[in-house]
Image (cartoon, rainbow, N blue to C red):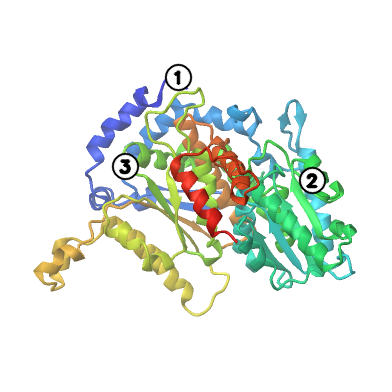
């Protein structure tokens, strides 16, 4: 990075361009370039992106890509794929892309090819999943496993639960899947309330195997199981497996490392759903389905690595986020999948995007003087339309939207799918073009009501179209956002792969735990608010 972002001539060119474009309405942009609905589109890895309903012209795209080049994006993309230690603050390579590389690839970390290990773990996972799925992996009393409970949090939960929901249609329906993440015991209690422990397999998913929520839940699960079977510890081997990078801690917990599926420190938690962390996904959709998902990831990786910047989906989406964040002052982006199976996708993206780019220090240790990570949120359509879309249409804030939709439904019943798709198209059209006072008046609306019924429009959106939901499609979508996040981080010159911001709360919680139970009864040393809340809680607790 030659200079701070705002001093780059390419950034300044965008600032001047922004001044000329900021008040232009999408109505006028479409009127002056009627072909833009076809030209401002791009297709890659089987996904079609229409970005014409953004507040841009072809010149904006050129200027954004000039900025990307000035920030050395092409070589930074290569640095990631080739295993350079681009996670600078943790001194690690960032190689989630190696998890989906073919067996004959060669990706070096510290001089060693990691691909054979990746495929060895995939093979071990496949053999295990086949046994569980066909009933030959039996529990302590000889009953086949029918319930799979993933215990993990953050990246060790959000990917697995999102993928399970997304690919339910491809799952083995006689297996029950549950996901426990919260340290709130309710999460555990409700997840196991109707399960037979003799038919239940717990997957303890934790990169570090030290996360307090996961270890607390895992210990509770162990106690629950042992209680039901009269305390025979040998049952653990049949009912617990671990997904981790930390074999020492896994053994300490009492799980045989033969039942551990490994991954590596060059896989970030929020980038790990296609590693061993995806064991629950593989159990649900089978090894073949999992490999199809990996092939989808790989297709998007290839596209990101090889497509020219102007035809590159993650690059364009990432640069549009930079455009809105740094020039329009936009704070949030809504992700709106018109696909019920993607109901957990916005929650998944929240960790991916916000834990990655929620940073205010550049990689070289300077405080940024520009905005970084956007706030991501969303819900599946059409539900959101009857909830928060009002604010997107008529509120005071500018909220770019990513609409995601598919040509085919996995549940083609009557006219549901046409109605669904008509809605997604109607929403992006209404947001972009709105409805003028003249149009409202011409419908016979009384004068006093006109201002309330006007839609300003000029609210930007992307529309992503895919063929239909499938394991491969999910891989493509996730990789698209992973790479778009990276593109943004390169422009902002921040480390998208560390997460120091989550540490302080963890440390403080550790200190407070014994104070709540009275185990540590010395004088409270916090601020007056925290002290008073601790004292009040001590009186309230059971
Ligand atoms: O607290 C944040 C975090 O470190 C995430 O980055 C990670 O996905 C999550 O906790 C869970 O960590 P682990 O897999 O080590 O239990």
Residue 80 image point, x, y percent: 60, 32
Q: Secondary structure at mark 1?
A: loop
* Image height of 349 relative to 389, above or below: above
- The quarter of the picture where the C terminus appears is bottom right
What x and y, as percent, mark residue 258?
86, 48
Quadrant in the rendering for residue 193: bottom right
Circle 3: element type: loop
In whole angstroms, how far apart are the C-alphas of marks 3 and 1?
27 Å
Looking at the picture, how far across and down is residue 479, in whole percent?
58, 47
Residue 315's place in the image compared with 425, above or below, is above
**Secondary structure found at label 2:** helix
The tag earlier along the polypeptide, 2 or 1, is 1
The answer to which of marks 3 and 1 sits earlier in the sequence is: 1
- The quadrant where residue 510 appears: top right
Asked whether 65 or 261 is in front, the reply is: 261
- Residue 527 sits above or below residue 213 on the image: above
Is residue 336 rendered to the left or right of residue 97? left
**Residue 250: which disc?**
2
Question: Is residue 114 in sight in this rendering?
Answer: yes
| Residue extending furthest toward the front | 522
The crowding category of the residue bearing disc 3, from other C-alpha atoms within 10 Å (few below 14, some 14 to 19, many at least 20), is some
Residue at (13, 74) in percent of width and height: 444
Q: Nearer the viewer, mark 2 or mark 1?
A: 2
Name the residue carrying label 1.
2
**How busy is the neighbourhood of tag 1: few (under 14 within 10 Å), some, or many (20 plus)?**
few
- Taking the image in four quarters, ligand 1 sits in the one at top right
The disc at residue 57 is: 3
Q: Is residue 295 visible?
A: no
Viewer-nearest of labels 3 and 1? Answer: 1
> x%, y% of residue 244?
74, 45
């Amino acid at each position: 990075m030659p200079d701070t972002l705002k001093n780059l001539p390419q950034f300044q060119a965008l600032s001047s361009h922004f001044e000329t474009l900021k008040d232009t309405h999408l109505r006028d942009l479409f009127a002056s370039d009627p072909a833009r609905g076809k030209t401002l589109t791009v297709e890659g890895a089987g996904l079609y992106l229409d970005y014409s309903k953004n507040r841009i012209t072809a010149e904006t795209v050129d200027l954004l890509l000039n900025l990307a080049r000035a920030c050395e994006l092409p070589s930074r993309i290569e640095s990631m794929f080739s295993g350079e230690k681009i996670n600078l603050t943790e001194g690690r390579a960032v190689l989630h892309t190696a998890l989906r590389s073919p067996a004959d690839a060669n990706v070096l970390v510290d001089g060693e090819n990691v691909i054979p290990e990746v495929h060895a773990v995939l093979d071990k996972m496949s053999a295990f999943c086949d046994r569980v799925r066909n009933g030959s992996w039996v529990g302590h009393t000889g009953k086949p496993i029918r319930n799979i409970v993933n215990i993990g949090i953050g990246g060790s939960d959000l990917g697995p639960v999102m993928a399970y929901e997304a690919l339910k249609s491809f799952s083995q329906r006689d297996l029950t899947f549950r996901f426990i993440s919260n340290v709130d015991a309710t999460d555990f209690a409700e997840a196991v309330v109707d399960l037979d422990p003799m038919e239940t397999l717990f997957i303890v998913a934790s990169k570090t195997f030290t996360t307090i929520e996961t270890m607390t839940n895992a210990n509770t699960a162990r106690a629950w199981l042992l209680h039901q079977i009269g305390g025979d510890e040998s049952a653990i081997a049949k009912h617990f497996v671990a997904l981790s990078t930390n074999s020492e801690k896994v053994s300490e917990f009492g799980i045989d490392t033969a039942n551990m599926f490994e991954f590596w420190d060059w896989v970030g938690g929020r980038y790990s759903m296609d590693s061993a962390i995806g064991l629950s996904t593989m159990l649900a959709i089978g090894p073949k389905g999992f490999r199809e998902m990996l092939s989808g990831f790989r297709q998007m990786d290839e596209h990101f690595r090889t497509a020219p910047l102007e035809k590159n989906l993650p690059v364009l989406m990432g640069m549009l986020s930079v455009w809105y964040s740094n020039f329009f002052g936009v704070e949030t982006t809504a992700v709106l999948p018109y696909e019920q199976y993607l109901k957990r996708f916005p929650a998944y993206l929240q960790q991916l995007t916000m834990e990655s780019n929620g940073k205010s220090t550049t990689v070289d240790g300077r405080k940024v003087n520009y905005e970084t990570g956007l706030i991501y949120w969303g819900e599946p359509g059409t539900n959101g339309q009857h909830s928060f879309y009002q604010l997107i249409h008529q509120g005071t804030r500018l909220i770019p939207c990513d609409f995601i939709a598919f040509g085919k439904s996995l549940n083609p019943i009557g006219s549901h799918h046409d109605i669904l798709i008509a809605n997604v198209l109607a929403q992006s059209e209404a947001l972009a073009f709105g409805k003028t006072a003249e149009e409202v008046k011409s419908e016979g609306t009384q004068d006093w009501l006109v201002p309330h019924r006007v839609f300003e429009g000029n609210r930007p959106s992307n529309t992503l179209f895919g063929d239909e939901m499938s394991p491969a499609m999910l891989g493509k979508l996730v990789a698209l956002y992973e790479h778009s996040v990276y593109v943004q981080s390169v422009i902002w010159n921040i480390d998208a792969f560390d997460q120091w911001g989550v540490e302080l709360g963890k440390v403080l919680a550790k200190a407070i735990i014994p104070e709540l139970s009275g185990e540590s009864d010395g004088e409270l040393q916090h601020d007056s608010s925290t002290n008073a809340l601790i004292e009040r809680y001590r009186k309230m607790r059971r």
